[in-house]
Image (cartoon, rainbow, N blue to C red):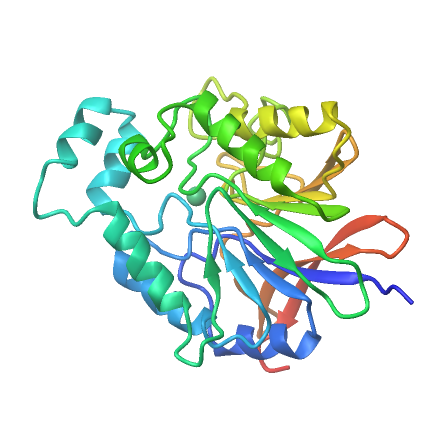
C-alpha cells in the first residue's frame, strides 16, 4: 500500500539551528528535510557551524545556498547595491576567496564524516526514494537568489553553470525539470516564483523599496510555466528568502496555490522563538498524500521535547 510522504521544510536559518532541531526532526521520521538556504548571518564561519550541525541529521537532507551562504560580506553588499561595477571588481581582489571555494567549503561541512550528511545542490536533480511510496524527483533551483529582475552573483553563476542572465537560468532550470521521470516533482528554491503579487505583504513582494513590487524569481516562473505547458505536474515549490514579517507591519502568507502547484514560503525569521517561557523551533511539514493531495502546516516544536 502506498503511504503519504512527509518532508520537513526548514526556512531561512540565519544561525538558528542546533542539536534540538536535529533531535526533533529525526524523531518525527520525515522522508527528507529540505533547507531553503540562508544558513549564515553576515559571515562565512556561522554558516559553516550550522552546516556541521545539519550534517549530524540521520534523515536525508538537501540544502540550496541562499544569498547569505558561501559569499563574502562585500560581495553581498555589492549585490544589495546592485552595482555590476563593484560585483566585477570584487572578482579581481585576490584576498577575497572565490565563491567556488566558499561553496565547496559549505558542501564539505554539510557532508558528515560518517558518509551520510546533507547534499548541497543547485540546478540539480535528486531522487527521493521513500519506503512504501513511489519515488519523488527533487529539483534544486538557482543558488544564491536574491529575488527580483536582476541576476545576483552573476560572475559565479556564469563560471559554475554557464548562466549569464535570467533567460539562461530559466533554460537551465527547464533542462533539469525535463530530466525528471518520477510522477511527483518537488522544487527547492531559495526565493519563490514571480507572479504571486506585487504588494509588500504578498508572498515574495518587496518590502525594502517604497515602490514595493513583485520580487519573485522570473526564471523559476518561466521554467514552471514551461513544465505546465508540456503537461508536467509540479507538486510543490518550497522557498523562503522573503521573511514572514513585513517591514512596516503585516505578515506574508506561508502558502498559496499557483496553477495546481503548492507554493510554500517557509521563512519564519527568527525560527526559534520563546512563548510563555518555552523555546519553540519552527519548520513546515509538507505532506504528499497517496491520493495526490499536497498540503503544508507550520510546526513549532518545543526545544525540550
Ligand atoms: Fe535570502
Residue 282: x percent and y percent? Answer: 60, 62
Name the image quarter holding residue 256. Answer: top right
Q: Quadrant of the N terminus?
A: bottom right
Q: Quadrant of ligand 1?
A: top left
| Residue 41 falls left or right of residue 215 | left
| Residue displayed at 74% across by 43% down | 235
Residue 185: x percent and y percent? Answer: 69, 46
Residue 47: x percent and y percent? Answer: 35, 60
| Residue displayed at 27% across by 32% down | 155
From the viewer's perspective, is residue 37 above or below residue 55? Answer: above
Residue 105: x percent and y percent? Answer: 29, 61
| Residue displayed at 52% across by 51% down | 36
Name the image quarter holding residue 226. Answer: top right
From the viewer's perspective, is residue 289 above or below residue 203? Answer: below
| Residue displayed at 60% across by 63% down | 33
The answer to whether one can see residue 305 in this image is yes
- In-front residue for pair 161/242: 161
Q: Quadrant of the C terminus?
A: bottom right
The count of marks equals 0
From the viewer's perspective, is residue 183 above or below residue 219? Answer: below
The answer to whether one can see residue 215 in this image is no
The residue most toward the top is 211
- In-front residue for pair 178/146: 178
Name the image quarter holding residue 276. Answer: bottom right
- In-front residue for pair 26/187: 187
| Residue 67 falls left or right of residue 274 | left
| Residue 92 falls left or right of residue 215 | left
Amino acid at each position: 500500500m502506498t503511504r503519504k510522504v512527509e518532508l520537513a521544510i526548514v526556512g531561512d536559518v540565519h544561525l538558528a539551528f542546533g542539536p534540538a532541531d536535529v533531535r526533533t526532526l529525526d524523531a518525527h521520521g520525515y522522508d527528507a528535510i529540505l533547507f531553503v538556504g540562508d544558513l549564515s548571518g553576515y559571515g562565512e564561519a556561522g554558516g559553516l557551524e550550522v552546516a556541521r550541525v545539519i550534517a549530524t541529521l540521520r534523515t536525508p537532507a538537501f540544502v540550496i545556498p541562499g544569498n547569505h551562504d558561501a559569499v563574502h560580506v562585500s560581495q553581498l553588499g555589492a549585490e544589495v547595491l546592485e552595482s555590476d561595477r563593484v560585483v566585477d571588481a570584487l572578482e579581481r581582489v585576490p584576498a577575497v576567496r572565490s565563491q567556488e571555494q566558499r561553496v565547496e567549503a559549505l558542501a564539505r561541512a554539510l557532508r558528515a564524516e560518517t558518509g551520510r550528511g546533507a547534499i548541497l545542490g543547485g540546478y540539480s536533480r535528486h531522487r527521493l526514494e521513500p519506503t512504501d511510496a513511489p519515488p519523488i524527483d527533487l529539483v534544486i533551483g538557482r543558488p544564491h537568489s536574491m529575488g527580483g529582475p536582476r541576476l545576483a552573483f552573476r560572475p559565479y553563476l556564469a563560471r559554475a553553470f554557464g548562466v549569464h542572465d535570467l533567460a539562461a537560468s530559466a533554460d537551465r532550470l527547464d533542462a533539469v525539470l525535463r530530466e525528471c521521470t518520477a510522477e511527483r516533482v518537488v522544487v527547492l528554491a531559495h526565493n519563490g516564483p514571480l507572479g504571486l503579487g506585487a504588494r509588500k505583504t504578498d508572498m515574495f513582494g518587496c518590502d525594502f523599496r517604497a515602490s514595493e513590487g513583485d520580487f519573485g524569481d522570473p526564471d523559476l516562473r518561466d521554467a514552471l510555466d514551461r513544465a505546465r505547458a508540456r503537461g508536467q505536474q509540479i507538486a510543490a515549490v518550497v522557498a523562503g528568502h522573503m521573511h514572514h514579517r513585513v517591514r512596516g507591519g503585516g505578515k506574508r502568507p506561508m502558502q498559496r496555490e499557483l496553477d495546481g502547484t503548492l507554493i510554500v514560503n517557509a521563512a519564519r525569521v527568527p525560527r526559534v522563538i520563546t512563548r510563555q517561557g518555552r523555546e519553540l523551533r519552527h519548520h513546515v511539514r509538507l505532506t504528499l498524500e497517496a491520493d495526490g493531495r499536497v498540503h503544508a502546516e507550520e510546526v513549532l516544536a518545543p526545544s525540550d521535547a
